[in-house]
Amino acid sequence: MSAEPPYTDNELAERGLLRDRLPRHVAIIMDGNGRWARMRGLPRVEGHRRGVTSVRAVVEECARLQLDQLTLYCFSSENWKRPPLELELLMSLLRTYVVKERDEIMRQGLRFGTIGRNDGLSPGILKEVQQTIDLSASNPGMRLCLALNYGSRTELVDAMRSIAERVKAGEIDPAAIDEAVIASHLYTAGMADPDLVIRTSGELRVSNFLLWQISYAELWVTEKHWPDFRAPDLHEAFHDFATRDRRFGGLSET
């Protein structure tokens, strides 16, 4: 990442973008690292390494576009089924990223955070993650959220358990449980729902990602594998988003 200044309105217009038609919160399912590597006769781990370059490029571009939040699906709760060597590399890349990009996160004024369970993540990784969270907590810029050891069904189970415990303790009346109460017990409590979900590598599924939060999000899929995804692809997604008629279950006014 580099601390490039935010785009001016004129610079946005040159790229065919309008500030008031940009999504405020973008969530990305970063898919295709392994396929990218296989197509080139490389080990899967090389796809993951190249994927980190895409992360840097996309974080930088979203920050320059002054989005409110970028959420990246980095490691799902199902990913623990992968081979031990690949898991070891993924954890190493995660720790390296959190440490190496810390100064840049601070320089750009980003607020760093994560969602997901801590189970399975090493104390060393958790320590580095928490340090970056604490250091960046008061930054004024875009929130960068990494979904780590995350699964949406697990998130909903944890939320229901938490609500049930509070009902049992007499803190919540069951009749008062509504969408707002449930949302306040999710890992994403306090975050706005995504406006746009981007998925790379052409897969047409959401893979247990933010199932509650993306109820009314727009979906955009590209055939490009994540290691090849860059700013122009992000702009393409935003151009398409700007044409969408978002009705949130209602009727169009046009």
Image: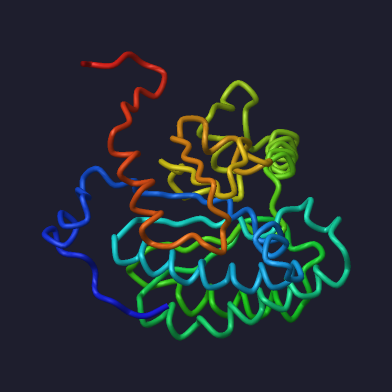
The vertical placement of 4 against 20, above or below, is below
Counting every numbered tag in the picture gives: 0
Position of the C terminus by quadrant: top left
Q: Residue at x 50, y 45 (%)?
A: 222
Q: Residue at x 74, y 81 (%)?
A: 124
Residue 13, position in %: x, y? 15, 54
Residue 238, position in %: x, y? 34, 46
Picture quadrant of residue 204: top right
Taking the image as shown, residue 229 lies to the left or right of residue 248, namely right
Viewer-proximal residue among 126 and 76? 76
Taking the image as shown, residue 31 lies to the left or right of residue 190, namely right
Viewer-proximal residue among 128 and 172? 128
The vertical placement of 250 against 248, above or below, is above
Q: Residue at x 29, y 60 (%)?
A: 65
Residue 194, position in %: x, y? 45, 43
Q: Residue at x 29, y 61 (%)?
A: 66
Position of the N terminus by quadrant: bottom left
Viewer-proximal residue among 228 and 190? 228
Q: Residue furthest top?
A: 251
Residue 197, position in %: x, y? 49, 43
Q: Residue furthest left?
A: 10
